[in-house]
Image (tube, grey):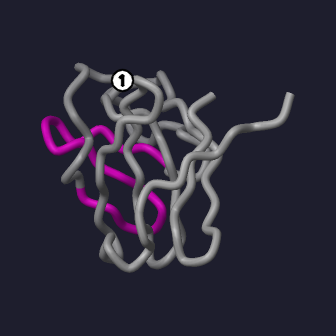
Amino acid sequence: MAEHFHRLFATDTLAPNASKTVDVDGVQILVCNANGEFYAVQHMCTHQRAELEGGRIRNCMISCPLHGARFDLRDGSTKGQLTNIPLKTYPVRVVDGFVEVAPA
């Protein structure tokens, strides 16, 4: 089954090392700009279900703003000891200067 991508926003509207939550077909997805590369992960931290938007992004890692749990944006894997449950990741691409995400 082919993935269905949704056009979200222009790439230049999300600064490097920033994130933005979007709703795609009822799914809350966090889109992150890690030094010009875009990634899409679930919006809630797997440690205590805190929102990840606004978490510090460095070296393709995001830190939860509540307790500092860290996740690799490339594959959702955890770093550190706060949780061993990875984040769900979503396919993301850039087409004609716009970020697109497939929610499933």
Asked if 54 appears above or below 14 in the picture, the reply is above
- Residue 45 lies in the magenta stretch: no
Q: Amino acid at mark 1?
A: Thr
Asked if 67 appears above or below 10 in the picture, the reply is above
Residue at 48% x, 78% y: name it.
36
Asked if 73 appears above or below 102 in the picture, the reply is below
**What x and y, as percent, mark residue 18?**
29, 65
Residue at 40% x, 58% y: name it.
32
Residue 51, quarter of the rendered image? top left
- Looking at the picture, tell me which residue is in the foreground, 57 or 13: 13
- Looking at the picture, tell me which residue is in the foreground, 74 or 6: 6
Which residue is farthest left?
Answer: 66
Q: Is residue 37 toward the left or the right of residue 19 in the image? A: right
Disc 1 target residue: 46
Quick one: quadrant of the N terminus?
top right
- Residue 58 lies in the magenta stretch: yes
Q: Is residue 104 toward the left or the right of residue 20 in the image? A: right
Label 1, secondary structure: give it: loop
Asked if 72 appears above or below 3 in the picture, the reply is below
Few, some or many C-alpha atoms within 10 Å of disc 1 (few <14, some 14-19, many ≥20)?
A: many
Which residue is farthest right?
Answer: 1
- Looking at the picture, tell me which residue is in the foreground, 52 or 84: 52
Quick one: quadrant of the C terminus?
top right
What segment carries the magenta color? 56-72
Residue at 23% x, 20% y: name it.
48
Q: Is residue 89 toward the left or the right of residue 84 in the image? A: right
